[in-house]
Image: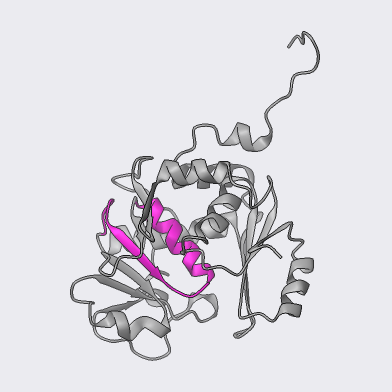
């Protein structure tokens, strides 16, 4: 290559790897191609003592299983809505990703097509189990099943997800025009969330973001999409004392926080 008039700035890794990336599946494939073993989602819950670290490959396996649970096991179709009614938890990342993988809309609708709930809201959603799909997560370490039987019609994710395959191929793949998010009265397409993530300011390329925010909430969506899109990773901490949070920040070598401070 000849250079005229001085050096040529080559595009950085983020620019090279993500040109034309407009769907979740494309973003995840890029990460798998370049950072399969790097931590993508790290989770701390001091109330339970849980500490989970998911590499890109492990996260992709969980997303594939959750996607198969939704689409293949229960027949949920592209364009339908999924509500994540969980506290801040690594499984919220998994089901947000699985929704986008299936072409679903992550929604806060009162009557979604699917709800993924935790122990605190099982009884709330059990009454709608005849009209919507209710998937319940025990939130016990390692994503295991509930210790006690669930109400009729409620499906235990800790029972059903383990038998799903580690790879998922949708029969009706998501497109960049599919609505990915419909939260707090605002909608964004798949292309829109990844365009916003590319232009985001939470982290620099390859950074580690520490957050305490629910990843399925309006302010929490970028805490997931920006690290995933921009070659970084997210550290989600919940029920953590301030001093302990500072220790985690040092141990995990975080480069940014949300909220700041």
Q: Quadrant of residue 84?
A: bottom left
Q: Residue at x 69, y 81 (%)?
A: 241
- Quadrant location of the N terminus in the rendered image: top right
Q: Residue at x 75, y 67 (%)?
A: 249
Q: Quadrant of residue 142?
A: bottom right
Q: Quadrant of residue 56?
A: bottom right
> 72 or 223, which is in the foreground?
223
Q: What colour scheme governs how the chains and residues are painted in the rendered image of this protein?
A: one colour
Give percent across and percent down for residue 229: 56, 46
Q: Residue at x 75, y 9 (%)?
A: 2
Give percent across and percent down for residue 181: 39, 54
Left or right: 261, with 227 as reference point: right
Give percent across and percent down for residue 37: 65, 54
**In this rendering, does residue 53 appear at all?**
no
**In this rendering, does residue 201 appear at all?**
yes
Q: Is residue 78 magenta?
A: yes
Q: Is residue 87 magenta?
A: yes
Give percent across and percent down for residue 138: 44, 81
Q: Which residues are magenta?
A: 76-102
Q: Residue at x 52, y 68 (%)?
A: 214
- Quadrant location of the C terminus in the rendered image: bottom right
């Amino acid at each position: 290559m000849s250079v005229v008039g001085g050096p040529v700035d080559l595009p950085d890794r983020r620019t090279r790897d993500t040109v034309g990336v407009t769907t979740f599946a494309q973003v995840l494939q890029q990460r798998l191609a370049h950072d399969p073993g790097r931590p993508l989602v790290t989770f701390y819950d001091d109330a339970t003592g849980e500490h989970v670290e998911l590499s890109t490959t492990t996260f992709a396996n969980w997303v594939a299983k959750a996607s198969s649970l939704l689409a293949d096991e229960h027949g949920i179709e592209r364009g339908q809505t999924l509500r994540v009614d969980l506290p801040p938890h690594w499984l919220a990342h998994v089901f947000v990703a699985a929704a986008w993988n299936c072409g679903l809309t992550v929604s806060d609708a009162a009557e979604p097509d699917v709800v993924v709930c935790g122990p605190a809201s099982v009884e709330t959603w059990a009454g709608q189990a005849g009209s919507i799909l209710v998937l319940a997560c025990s939130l016990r370490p390692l994503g295991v099943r509930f210790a006690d039987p669930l109400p009729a019609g409620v499906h235990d994710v800790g029972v059903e997800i383990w038998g799903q395959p580690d790879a998922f191929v949708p029969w009706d793949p998501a497109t960049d025009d599919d609505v990915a998010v419909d939260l707090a009265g605002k909608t964004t397409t798949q292309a829109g969330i990844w365009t916003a993530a590319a232009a985001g300011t939470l982290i620099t390329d390859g950074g580690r973001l520490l957050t305490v925010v629910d990843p399925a909430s309006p302010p929490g969506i970028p805490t997931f999409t920006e690290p995933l899109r921009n070659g970084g990773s997210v550290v989600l901490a919940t029920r953590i004392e301030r001093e302990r949070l500072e220790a985690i920040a040092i141990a995990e070598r975080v480069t940014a926080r949300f909220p700041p401070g």
